[in-house]
Image (spheres, helix red, strand yellow):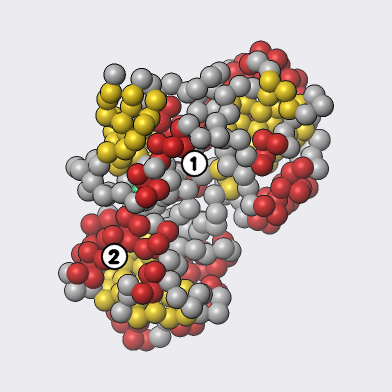
Amino acid sequence: MMKVAHSICPSCSVGCGVNLIIKDNEAVGTYPYKRHPVNEGKTCRKGRECFKIMTENRLKEPLIKEDGLKLSNWEDALDTVASQIKSYPSHEIGILVSGNYTNQEYETLKKFADALGIRNIGCHTGSVPSSNLETVALDDVEKSEFILIIGDVIKKYPLLGRRVILAQENGAEILAVDEPDKTLTGINSQEYIQVESASSIIDEVDDIILEKLSPQSTVLISNLESEDDFEKIVKFFEQSDAKIIPVFQDCNSRGAVNILPVLSSDDMKGMLERVKLLYILGDDPAPHMMESIKNLDFIISQGYLINKTTSISDVVLPGSCWAEKTGSFTNTTGETQEISKIVDAPGAALDDQIIIKKIAEKIGLDL
Ligand code: SF4
């Protein structure tokens, strides 16, 4: 039987609505979600193909390392995880999570860490500023008279880019700033300023640009590798009257920031030097972190995809992807949107909150 179900695209932080076409408990395509306020029925290629995430490269059964990773079952995997966690003092345990979990999952993970007294916990979700961020309406981007864009927003976040193009059609002036010779955003702007590095962006903002940063203008800030630069640039533009939109990397980076500490590369490096056991959930961290992770005593990984972390783990717990669970995501402009479970997870994979609670139960905690 065929059905169409509303969801939110999980492939970037814009939070577009997408309809999933479901046939016999399997997503087989997408269909425009015309009334969705973020993207008004439009999607980019990543959005149209997001249903593929649910079937490609999936983890379906628990795995335990014994001379290589071997298929296991939940009872043995959870027993191993619980006994390993119990065998380390809390300061030698670390928890690392990526930016594509739901707000409710972050809350459950936080409760779990608090119950065990684990302080080494955080999210790796690309660099994010730590200043208090206001919610901005996407419609304001479209109504802007002047838009300053740092990074290739039109290419990387196409449905946010669409609002920029619509603003331009309404007469807005667009100024793009970035490091490469040419970017898609630059090509679509009236002016493109090439900078040597992210930290020199502020130096390029002269009095003429400052005058244009009125309440009718918007500053979109993306692609900043270093959180120091990100924070400095957000703080600089916050002094103006313009609306500021930091463009986050993952679908729920902004939700994660609201609930858990966000770890910079240095924070993460420090954590990996302190801990011996790591419980890591979701996407791989940056490639240069993998070497430090590999050297830890014990690695428990949880997620829905087979990735680099899976291959170096001692226990692998198969979790769910976004359309297999209920919860909420907070998009890059600060809007929180609900998602509902549409299909069952494949094989023995479980809802991630259930997995965390089952581990807690085995340890003797009541979350
Ligand atoms: S812009 Fe982002 S959220 Fe929107 S459809 Fe594309 S990948 Fe998905």
Q: Quadrant of the C terminus?
A: top right
User: Mark 2: which amino acid?
Assistant: Val
Horizontal arrangement in the rendering, residue 148 relative to residue 199 (left or right): left
The N terminus lies in quadrant: top left
Say which residue appears at 36% left-offset and 46% top-offset: 47
Quarter of image, res 80? top right
**Residue neighbourhood size for the residue with mark 1, other residues' Cα within 10 Å, grouped as few (<14), some (14–19), many (≥20):** many
Q: Sequence order check: which comes first, mark 2 or mark 1?
A: 1
Q: Which residue is mark 1?
A: 100
Q: Amino acid at mark 1?
A: Asn
The one nearer the camera, 17 or 112, is 17
**Where does the image place residue 97, in percent across and percent down from the top left?**
58, 40
Q: Mark 1: is the Cβ under 8 angstroms from ligand 1? A: no
Does residue 364 appear anywhere in the picture?
A: no
- For the view shown, which residue lies furthest in the left direction? 170
Q: Is residue 109 above or below residue 183?
A: above
Q: Which mark is residue 164?
A: 2
Q: Are marks 2 and 1 in contact (CB under 8 Å)?
A: no
Return the residue nearer the eye: 181 or 119: 181
Label 2: which secondary element:
helix
- Residue at x 37%, y 50% (from the top left corner): 45
Packing grade of label 2 (10 A; few <14, some 14-19, many >=20) is many
Does 337 sit above or below residue 124? above
Distance CA(mark 2)–CA(mark 1)? 25 Å
160 left or right of 314 in image: left
Q: Secondary structure at mark 1?
A: loop
Q: Do we see residue 211 in this rendering?
A: yes
Instruction: Give the percent coordinates (x, y) of residue 342.
Output: 36, 25
Left or right, 272 with reference to 73: right
